[in-house]
Image (cartoon, helix red, strand yellow):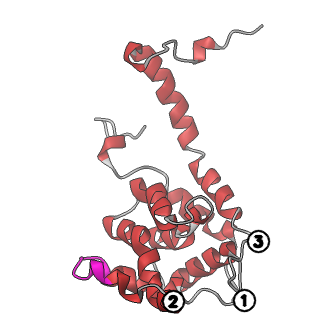
């Protein structure tokens, strides 16, 4: 039997780990983190076929939202946020916006993070009153520096992206943007002293 323990840490409790153990873990993490864009795109594809009662499925809504942002000349980071804004729908039935924001947080600006995290409440302006909820729930954020930025995202892209006759770009068209945005985290907690990321 082949012994592969040389590639793995030897501790059973993290407190007992050595620098050598954590070097092995860091190397494995570095390789695993490079596949994050692939895993994100695979998860996004899982939205295919789930209409949720809408005229188009959630995958097409994501593509359409991002395509509209591209056509308006938005930068790659904004477009990726538009593409992935509803990626949390499958696992975060009641807090999908927070999931998408959490996935992208290490890679995006504060404005885009706020937009992703809160777009669900802001989107409610367009329909909450039809289902017995407060359409003005977003007003709790009035005065926040990113209020108008988020309201604009919902108005221009999110709420307008349910057209079954719209021709969206393919997921493959967005792949270079996803890879670029997720190439390395911005947050200093994930950065070494020499400026490289884990």
Tell me which label, 1 or 3, sits earlier in the chain: 3
Which mark identifies residue 164? 1
Which mark identifies residue 49? 3
- In the rendered structure, which segment of residues is drawn in magenta? 139-147
Q: Position of residue 164 (x, y in %)?
A: 72, 89
Between the residue at mark 3 and the residue at mark 2, the CA separation in whole angstroms equals: 22 Å
Tell me which label, 3 or 2, sits earlier in the chain: 3
Residue 49 lies left or right of residue 151; in this view the side is right
Instruction: Give the class, few, some or many, for how many residues have Cα within 10 Å of label 3's Cα (few <14, many ≥20).
Output: few
Quarter the N terminus occupies? top right
Q: Position of residue 83 (x, y in %)?
A: 56, 71
Q: Residue at x 51, y 81 (%)?
A: 69
Q: Is residue 141 magenta?
A: yes
Between the residue at mark 1 and the residue at mark 2, the CA separation in whole angstroms equals: 19 Å
Residue 124 lies left or right of residue 140; in this view the side is right
Number of numbered discs visible in the structure rendering: 3
**Residue matched to label 2:** 127
């Amino acid at each position: 039997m082949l012994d592969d323990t040389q590639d793995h840490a030897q501790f059973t409790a993290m407190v007992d780990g050595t620098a050598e153990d954590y070097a092995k873990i860091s190397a494995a993490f570095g390789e695993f983190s490079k596949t994050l864009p692939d895993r994100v795109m695979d998860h996004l594809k899982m939205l295919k076929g789930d209409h949720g009662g809408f005229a188009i499925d959630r995958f097409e809504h994501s593509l359409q939202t991002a395509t509209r942002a591209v056509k308006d000349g938005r930068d790659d980071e904004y477009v990726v946020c538009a593409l992935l804004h509803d990626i949390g729908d499958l696992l975060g039935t009641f807090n999908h916006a927070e999931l998408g924001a959490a996935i992208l947080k290490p890679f995006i600006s504060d404005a885009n993070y706020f937009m992703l995290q809160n777009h669900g409440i802001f989107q409610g302006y367009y329909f909450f009153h039809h289902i017995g909820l407060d359409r003005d729930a977003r007003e709790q954020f009035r005065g926040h520096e990113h209020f108008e930025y988020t309201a604009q995202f919902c108005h221009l892209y999110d709420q307008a992206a349910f057209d079954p006759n719209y021709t969206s770009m393919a997921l493959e068209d967005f792949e270079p943007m996803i890879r670029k945005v997720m190439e390395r985290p911005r947050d200093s907690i994930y950065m070494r002293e020499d400026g490289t990321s884990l």
